[in-house]
Every structure is written in C-alpha cells, then in structure tokens.
Image (tube, rainbow, N blue to C red):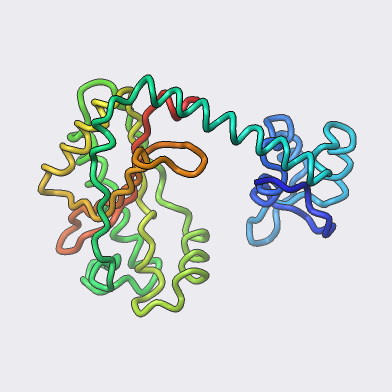
Amino acid sequence: MGSGASTDKKPLTEVRLKSEVGVLFDDKAKRAFDAAATEDPDGTRTVPWPTIEAHAKEHDERALDPRKCMFHNLKAFKSAREQIAEIARVHIKGAVREIPWVGKSLGDECRQCGLDGKPAASLDALYEVAALARVQFEEIMTAACPESGVKLMFAPLKGRDRAGAKARDEYADKTAPCYSWLFDITRGAALCQTEDAIVQLYASLEADDRVDIVRTKNRFAPPLFNGYQDILMNVAVKVEKVSHMCELQIHLMPIKES
C-alpha cells in the first residue's frame, strides 16, 4: 500500500514505483517519470534511482519516508472507502446485489482452444481465435446494452509480449498448455449510469444463446477490500466450432468516477 520509495538503488518501473509510494505518485510524479524514463531492450520503461531520489527531495520528500508513505496511503484508503460507500448508498437499491456469483469448473475442458479445437499451444493459435472472438463479442455486447445509459469500451487485444510472459510465469505448471489459460486477451467494459442498466445488461447476456456466462464475480456483494464495487466476468463466445473466453468488466459510473 505504499511503503516508501526503494532503497536498493536499482532503477524502478512505473508499476513498482506506484506500488511503493501509492497516492504520492500523482499526476506531477507521472509526468516526471515519463520525462526521465528510458526503455530497455525488452520494452520495460525505468528511471534510475538517483533521478527518483533527486526529484523526491526537490518536490516531495514524503516519498522517501516509509512511515509517511504508509500514513498518507492509509488516509487515502479510508477516505476512498467512505466515499464509495456513500455513493453506493445513494445509487444502489439492492437489485444489482442479487446478481449471482458464478464459478463454473475451469478444468482442462474450459481452456482456450485454437481453431482446430485443441487447447491453444502457442500465441499464434490463441490470437487467431481471439481476433475473431473480438468481433462476435462486440456484436453481442452491443445487442445486450439498453438503448441509453451504457457506454461500451473495447480494448485492443492484449499485447503479445505481456500475454506470453504471463502464460509462462503463471501457468507453466498446468496440465494444459500455458497459453490456453489466458482469458483476458479479448476484453471489454460496460460503463453503466444506473443500477437498473447493470441488471438489464446482465439479464440480456443470460438470455443470449450466443454467449455462455462462465464466471461472474459480483463485487457489489460484497465489495472489494478497498471498497470498490463492480462486476467482473468471463463470457464464452462461439468462434466457428470452438468457444473463446472474453473478459468483461461492468462498472457503475458514479462509483468509477469517484
């Protein structure tokens, strides 16, 4: 939750710096990081420790003090939870909390497959299906949305380098090929203005024969540890003779904008 910038003197990535200083990594710090960052051969952007230390001493020395970092992050954490709880009290009457958690078995039979119907043994096989699934996913989501009150956003297919690293690092010990465990190559988000829009969207997906709801994490009941509330889903769409799982996040905009 932010324990002070590193003292091991090594260059820091943006992700690691954010994790170490938390809320003190604000817009100004982000701009300073971008201006000073260099890109490694593998595409990783880092900033040397002396540069980070000098910037902190000039602009905000709290980032170098673990106790001050922790204090400010705990304070921000508490404030965010209280703010989200109040927004939820005003905008959520209860129907969205009735959406069930779904956790179908994700054994080898649920792995991502190539067009040949076999678990994807390479990124090429996985991305060939993902590109086709994205078209189907967008069509299904567009049809499922109410006429107003929902904005859809579809991300590009997840970067191949990131996907490959995740598969090898996290799923190499699985029985099916590691690439077949990646369920977030095709991704989208629904930004709903009201609770009713979320409930209607979910009901439309349940009723659509073209999509299978594989997993639903209803984080309105209960909220995440930081107070945030949304719904995270994996839905399977048909691509030729196989199914491909896509990731869908459903937000309530008053909470997301807080």
What residue appears at the point 71 percent right and 34 percent down from the top-left corner? 31
Image coords of residue 170 (percent x, y):
48, 69
Picture quadrant where residue 222 is located? top left
The residue located at (19%, 63%) in the rendering is 242
**How many numbered circles does the render carry?**
0
Name the spot of residue 151 as percent of width and height, x first. Answer: 33, 28
| Residue in the image at 71% along x and 48% along y | 20
54 with respect to 121 (left or right): right
Where on the picture, by quarter, is residue 118? bottom left
| 63 relative position to 225: left or right | right
Vertical placement of residue 225 versus 253, above or below? below
**Residue 41: image location, x then y, percent:** 68, 61
Above or below residue 244? Residue 181 is: below
Which one is in front, 138 or 258? 258
> Residue at 22% of width from left, 71% of height from top?
116
Q: Position of residue 46 (x, y in %)?
A: 73, 52
Left or right? Give the position of 48 relative to 220: right
Q: Can you say whether 191 is above or below 34 in the image?
A: above
Using the rendered view, name the quadrant where residue 125 is placed. bottom left
